[in-house]
Image: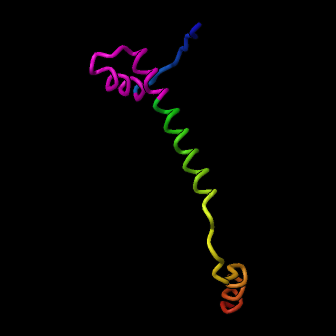
Amino acid sequence: MTDTITIRTDSETEHALDVLTHDGSSRSAAIRQAVLEAALRKERAAAMRRAVLRMPLGEPDGIDIAAEIAHSRENER
């Protein structure tokens, strides 16, 4: 069974729907397609974030950033 979704539109949303239905698609089909595409983009972005987080960081370069900042602040006095 499918659910019905009701949305309130504003002028920006109406313009977007006009663009999406310019090819003759129904508003319902255009909204369904937009929701599916938005979900796919979110899934891809989440997958890319997970992939980046799994990437090896490599070898440390030996620089202690906190110590460098503290040292530069001491020199500013």
**41 part of magenta stretch:** no
Colour pattern of the rendering: rainbow
State the predominant SS element of the stretch in magenta.
helix
Q: Residue at x 41, y 16 (%)?
A: 29
Image quarter for residue 70?
bottom right
Q: Residue at x 60, y 60 (%)?
A: 55
Residue 46 versus residue 5 in the image, above or below: below
Image quarter for residue 16?
top left
Locate residue 5, reporting x and y percent.
Answer: 55, 14
Q: Residue at x 34, y 24 (%)?
A: 20
Q: Nearer the viewer, residue 66 or 32?
A: 32
Q: Residue furthest top?
A: 1
Q: Which residues are magenta?
A: 12-36
Residue 31 versus residue 61 in the image, above or below: above
60 horizontally vs 24: left or right: right
**24 part of magenta stretch:** yes
Residue 70 versus residue 10 in the image, above or below: below
Q: Residue at x 72, y 79 (%)?
A: 66
Q: Quadrant of the C terminus?
A: bottom right
Q: Residue furthest left?
A: 23
Locate residue 58, reporting x and y percent.
Answer: 62, 72
Locate residue 62, reporting x and y percent.
Answer: 67, 83
20 horizontally vs 53: left or right: left
Number of callouts in the render?
0
Q: Quadrant of the N terminus?
A: top right
